[in-house]
Structure formats: structure tokens, C-alpha cells
Amino acid sequence: MLDAKKIREDFPILKRRVNDKPLVYLDNAATSQKPLQVVQALADYYTLHNANIHRGIHALSEESTALYEGVREKTARFIGAPKPTMVIFTRNTTESINLVSHSWGLKHLRQGDEILLTEMEHHSNLVPWQILAQRKGLRLKFIPVVTDGRLDMGAVPGLLEGRTKLVSLTLMSNVLGTINPVKEIIQMAHAKGIPVLVDGAQAVPHMPVNVVDLNCDFLAFSSHKMLGPTGVGVLYAKEAILEEMDPFLSGGDMIKDVWLDHSTWNDLPWKFEAGTPNIADVIAFGAAIDYLKGIGMPEIRAHEAELTRTTLEKLRQVEGITVYGPMDPAVRGGAVSFNVQDLHPHDLGQILDDAGIAIRAGHHCCKPLMRKLGVVATARASFYLYNTLEEADLLVAALRKAKEIFSVVSRR
Ligand code: C6P
């Protein structure tokens, strides 16, 4: 088992006090904290190596290029991608999905074609497809979410019929925590020749994800949710698909040759990385991957499953709390959404903040899912490798207290 107390030593921010209480950081689904190793990698880069990449023939540029491209190799190994050229650096998951909607969707989809999503998608995996649908006259279809926060798998075969040309879905819900049976859905889609994009924003940081095992066509995720810096995202895609796709952004670095009236495109993956990339943050992202690998993704998953199991068990005992999503930790990750009867999640977030506990309250960029759940917002606690059982207990104790305070106030 992983030693969360030891791990916390690498995260100085976790020693902070907030509102005169020790910080309990449970907003990891929004963004994770960063270990000293990542901060140091960033400082080392600017202190020792800073130069633009792929351009200079001087030593610093060669060093920077080697460090940057080294992280591409590391990222490929982390997700089991057969080649580093299948890994494209973007700004975040959102940009990775937009890249696919523009470069693949605009080229391959025709009026009347259909895209299959789910009702639990983050706006990042919904709005780009809505815009594409408006531009090209496409139809969006949705796998329903059923009462325990899982997908209605019985509906999938029927939904794959018709003119479905792409399936795009999340591997782990940022609201419900549900881990979707994506491998099974990919098999069903591939049997009909339909490619599948997997939104890995919540899954890749928290569990082993292997693109060859999943056999997904695209995988999108963000560095900032997995101990790395903000401003770095990843798009993995199969080589043949990338080869066929047109560039997304254009300008420097993504060209092979340029004339006044036309240009030819660079090889993969640089065809999709126009302009000077986020060199420093990509390099520091490499340190985040090293850190996660050093602890072990199966160990991280097991630790979070234990925290989630305990939290769900304890929340179940508190009257007036509704928890959304599956109750079985085997099919869910560590994002736990809930509501307390008669208490708005924003007020709850405020009360918990007074106790030094950081959670997120709101629609979590999943407004259609909120409507489906019949709420305008939820409170959400989300765990990571450095969280402890004591912190889970503090959360539950603070919730009990919030309920007491509120029932006294509302009785007045
Ligand atoms: N969810 C949350 O608090 P970006 O912002 O591009 O790095 O990630 C977008 C995104 C895409 N898919 C899923 C499943 C996500 O959870 C997120 C980000 C954060 O839930 C911020 S809204």
C-alpha cells in the first residue's frame, strides 16, 4: 500500500493552514497539487536549459529539444502508446478534443452523420461536437445515464445503428465518479467500423490506462490533474488516423516546406504542434509522470478506492445526504458528489472552507447531467494519492457539523 503521509512531504502546500485550520485539499478533480520534484523541474529548466526547441543548433536548444521530446517518449510509455509520434502536446483536454473535432470531424463527417456521446459528458466533450454538428448538419445522440450513475449499456447496440460515425465518451465521470465500460463500448463500436475518442481527463491521473489494451482511437487528458503544470494537455491517436488528419492550428514548426501560395505539412507529431509550445511545462510534466510511476498507478487506484469506500460508507450513515453515482468502489473513482438536504452546495462549500476543507460546489461543467439528476448543483469531494483516511473523516465530521449549524439557523 502507498504511504500517503510520506508522499505529503513532497507537497509543501499541504502543510498550509487555511482559515486557521490545516488545509484538507479535496478538490483534486479540478486540479491536483504539485510535488517539489515538478516545481524543481520547472526551475531547473529556466535556470539551466531555457531555449527554443527544434530550431537552434546551439547547445541549449539541443538540450531543450531533447528534454521536450524525452517527455513525449515518457508520456507514450505511460499510456502504452506504441510510438511517441502518436502523442501530441496541446494545452489541455479541452484543446485535445477540439483538435479532433476540427481536424478529424470537419474532414470526415457529412451532413446527416451522427456522433454518439453520453449524458454524463463534461462540456469539453459536448460543446465542440455541438458546434461541429451545427456547422456540418450532424445529429448528436446520447447513451442514457441510469439511476445508479452508470451508463445504460442495453441502449448501446441500438444507438450504434444508423449513421453513427464517432463515439466520444469519458472513461471516468468527474461528477459521478463512474468508471465506464469503455473497452466494451469500443469493441462494439469497432465491430461497426466506428472510431472512439476517450476523454481520459479524470481516469489517466487515477488509474492505469493503456491505449493498446483499450484499443481507443483517441485519448485526451490534462497534465494539471496528474501532478503536472497547467497549460499542457495530451492527445493520443492511432498513427493512420493522425496521418489522414489535417492540421488544427497553423504557422511555424508544423510545416515541411512553404511557398508564397501553399505549404506542406511536417511529420507526426509536429504537424499538430504549431508555434513555440509550452516547453517548460511539458518538461515539468515529465517529472510528474516519473513521480506517479514511482508510486505506481495500481497503488494510487487502490488507495483512492479505499478512501472512497470509507467516505461512501460514512456518508451513507448521515441522514439527509444524497450521494450521486455508484456506491460500489470497484466501478468508480474518487470523485464523490453529494447534496445535503436544504443546504445549497455553495453554502456548504463555504462552511467547509471555514473548516479548511477545499471541495468544489457547482455544476462541474456538466449542466445536462445536473438536469438529469434534477439538481442545479452538487458539492464534490475528490481524492488523490496524498489524501488520508483522517481527511476523509474530517470531511464527514464537518458535514455533520454543517447540518447541525444549518438546522439550528433554520429553526430560528
Ligand atoms: N474537469 C472539474 O472540476 P481541462 O479543463 O481541459 O483540463 O479538462 C476538461 C475536462 C474534460 N473532461 C473531464 C471529464 C473533466 O473532468 C474535465 C475537467 C474539472 O471537474 C474542471 S471543470
Image: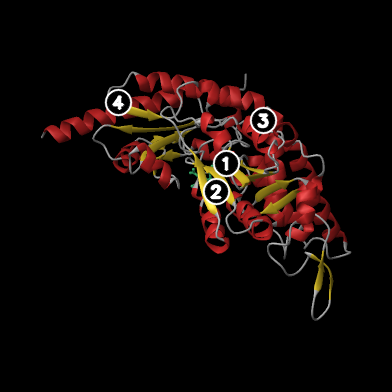
Residue drawn at the location 73% of the way across and 53% of the way down: 45
Percent across and percent down for residue 49 are: 78, 56
Question: Dot 1 corresponds to which residue?
Answer: 169
The CA distance from mark 1 to mark 4 is 35 Å
Residue drawn at the location 80% of the way across and 81% of the way down: 260
Colouring of the image: secondary structure
Residue type marked 1: Leu
Q: Nearer the viewer, mark 3 or mark 2?
A: 2
Mark 2 Cβ inside 8 Å of ligand 1: yes
Percent across and percent down for residue 226 are: 61, 40
Residue type marked 4: Arg
The local crowd at label 1, few if under 14, some if 14 to 19, many if 20 or more residues have their Cα within 10 Å, is: many
Percent across and percent down for residue 136 are: 58, 61
**Residue, far bottom:** 260
Question: Dot 2 corresponds to which residue?
Answer: 125
Pointer 4 with pointer 2, Cβ within 8 A? no
Residue type marked 3: Pro
- Label ID, residue 208: 3
The earlier-in-sequence mark between 4 and 2 is 2
